[in-house]
Amino acid sequence: MNNNIRIIMKIKAYFFICMVMCITESSCSLHNKAVLDSFAVDKQLEYCDAQVKRTLAKVDNDSSRMPRCVNANSADWYMVNIYDWTSGFWPGILWYDYEVTQDENIKKTAIRYTEYLLPLALPDHIGDHDIGFQLFCSFGNAYRQTENEAYKDVLIEGARKLATLYNPKVGTILSWPGMVEKMSWPHNTILDNLMNLEILFWASKNGGKKEWYDIAKNHAQVTMENQFRDDFTSYHVAVYDTITGKLIKGVTNQGYGDETFWARGQAWSIYGYTIAYRETGDKNFLRFAEKITDVYLKRLPEDYIPYWDFDDPNIPDAPKDASSAAIVSSALLEMSQLEDNKEKAKAYKDVAIKMLENLSSDKYQSRDANSSFLLHSTGNYPGGYEIDASINYADHYYLEALVRYKEMQSNTK
């Protein structure tokens, strides 16, 4: 074989190798893009917008009543008044929908439903520990998007009312005043309260009293020290002595039993300690958030949507709780951005996306069944209501998670 032929063959071989490498690299790039695009967030946001409009067509009649839940085997919303603990979630949904769509009709409707809640900020309304849920989901999102100073004033008043429930001897906010007599609980605090700390943190930095920051941080610290077992699973309720300030006992009021692992309580905690770390920068809260997250994730079934209580002996025939997955998916997307550990940040983001993928499947989306976003949430199993239902807070945190994921996508482009 002469030198010219050898040179030609080498050139052909070189170009063949280059072509293969190019195709392989292109295929890998396409594969990676397919993985990234496997969860079509825009499609899910469009679905939520369509469901919002379906709900408005059913319930929007200038009434101040809010859609709370659609019970199993029903297509109709159960409506509640503004004093219900869930009343802020529907306005919050409308504000998130407006944030995505910029639909002025949705904005007008969001303003109207938000302002229905104004009596909650009046002096003659005492308020309770849920005022954070009621006002921060509604007026908080409204102020964030409109910068209307009147909304800011409402939030500060809500924080003031919440702060009045703080017991400095115990170091936490009182949750259920009625339980003091009914159950002989001198001072009780529920895990849900961790979510309501956000309005205190926010208000303390936006014109409210600086002591509200300390109240929120103390509450998170005392709850961390008393309301979790050695394995980092949680009690729904902590009961304290008002004289000594010491813990009397832990109770799991809405779980299967006092020593069982109630899914939504842990979900509130994961979200709550993400807030606490974001607002304080205290690494102890981040490390604790990791521990309570990891035990939750370890117990999840294959579809990433927990049963209502991880210890229900009827699993796998026990009800699921999509609301818990929605809350945690939103929390983990934020935690992944706050994390100082890159491996954990990626793992939490990946799990959050998995949760959203499954929540967005035909198994969990309501679609034609009713006009909510999600099916298969459990409100209060021991109480016998909202079992295998669609619930407004499941929808609220699902949409919040979608909005957060969309924003994260936009920031990486």
Image (spheres, rainbow, N blue to C red):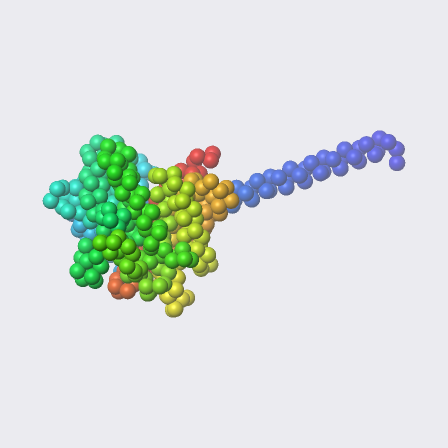
Q: Residue at image x 29%, y 63%?
A: 381
Q: Residue at image x 17%, y 41%?
A: 121
The residue most toward the left is 124
Q: Quick check: 91 above or below 306?
A: above
Q: Please indicate, yes or no, whether residue 371 appears anywhere in the rendered image.
A: no
Residue 285, how many percent across, how many down?
39, 45
- Badge count: 0
The residue most toward the bottom is 314
Q: Quadrant of residue 322?
A: bottom left
Q: Residue at image x 79%, y 35%?
A: 10
Q: Please indicate, yes or no, whether residue 312 appears anywhere in the rendered image.
A: yes
Residue 16, how many percent across, how many down?
72, 38
Q: Which of 343 and 243 lies nearest the eye of the viewer?
A: 243
The residue most toward the front is 244
Q: Quadrant of residue 46?
A: top left
209 relative to 356 in the view: left or right: left
342 relative to 1 in the view: left or right: left
Q: Residue at image x 37%, y 60%?
A: 261
Q: Quick check: 170 above or below 312?
A: above
Q: Which of 168 and 260 lies nearest the eye of the viewer?
A: 168
Q: Say which quadrant the N terminus sits in.
A: top right
Residue 55, how many percent across, how many down?
26, 49
